[in-house]
Amino acid sequence: MSFSTHFSHAITRRPSASITRGLRAVDTGTPDLALMQAHQAAYIATLRETGATVVELPALDAYPDSVFVEDTALCLPQGAVIMRPGAPSRLGEAAEMAPHLQALYTRVVAITGSDSFIEGGDILVTGREILVGRSARTNAAGIAELTRLVAPWGHKVREVLTPPGVLHFKTDCSLLDTDTILSTSRLSASGCFEGYTVIDIPDGEEAAANTIRFNDLVLMPAGFPHTRDAITRAGFTLREIGNSECAKLDGGMSCLSLRFTPS
Ligand code: GLY
């Protein structure tokens, strides 16, 4: 079992009524809070089904995107790193998360450089290495600072590129096991997954690329039958979770939790 696929804990945050003001690349409609809450309840129940402890934090009205907790921290076996989100409206979310990680981890460090920006959605931890996609939210200074912070913990960071126009690196890929990555072909074509087995997302289902492997389950957004079949054929046990409301805000399965085993 790898630290990149098996976890004892997850942290989630309830969506706030202010979610209607959440950031989005394209306006495809106003997210429905009640439906988002129902989808989140199914997501949390599925995480718990694997035996994990799931912490549910209260909604933060001041931060419309704060349901997407993944962007606030990187959780590793040795400690947690508090991020510095590149979206100005999300910068304060990181400080809101810090005490909850400090309560569980012995070591919590933070990205602090005033020019450093980095969001968890741009980080894929494979177990062999940490891939970080430079994006509109994550810059070279943020990646360099993360590299320095995690080097003493034995982790290697490799800088890669998030495709232009894509919110986060993990919008377009996810880890299914330490050797296997689910990816859009526009991302895998860059060659960044050389040495891994890549399952390419079938054309037209790019919105299904953001899944999570959580213990023995893969959680994926509902409504993408070709991707569902490809993951099942590869031998993984799946759960489909409604994601229509988070998708309106460019959010997916990984965005909705921090997953870790505290030390
Ligand atoms: N709506 C999620 C984000 O833009 O960070």
Image (cartoon, rainbow, N blue to C red):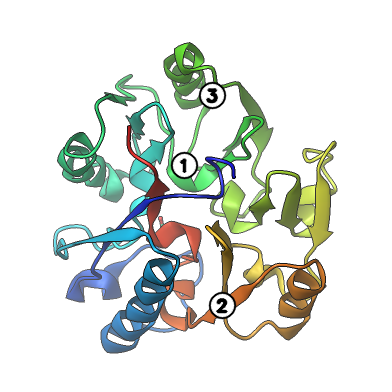
Q: Which quadrant holds residue 55?
A: bottom left
Q: Which quadrant holds residue 12?
A: bottom left
Q: Which quadrant holds residue 179?
A: top right
Disc 1 residue crowd, few under 14, some 14–19, many 20+, Cα 10 Å = many
Residue for badge 3:
140
Tell me: is circle 1 under 8 Å from ligand 1: yes
Disc 3 residue crowd, few under 14, some 14–19, many 20+, Cα 10 Å = some
Tell me: is circle 2 under 8 Å from ligand 1: no
* Rendering quadrant holding ligand 1: bottom left
- Residue ID at (40%, 38%): 75
Q: Amino acid at mark 1?
A: Arg
- Residue ID at (66%, 64%): 209
Disc 2 residue crowd, few under 14, some 14–19, many 20+, Cα 10 Å = some
Distance, label 2 to label 3, CA atoms, is 36 Å
Q: Which of the image's four quarters has the C terminus?
A: top left
Q: Amino acid at mark 2?
A: Arg
Mark count: 3
At mark 2, the secondary structure is: strand
Residue for badge 1:
137
Q: Position of residue 244 (x, y in %)?
A: 48, 82
- Give the side of residue 146 with respect to residue 182, left or right: left
Residue 85 visible somewhere in the drawing: yes
- Give the side of residue 232 with respect to residue 245, left or right: right
Q: Is residue 42 above or below residue 214?
A: below
Q: Is residue 11 above or below residue 161?
A: below
Residue for badge 2:
239
- Residue ID at (30%, 25%): 110
Q: Position of residue 204 (x, y in %)?
A: 76, 76
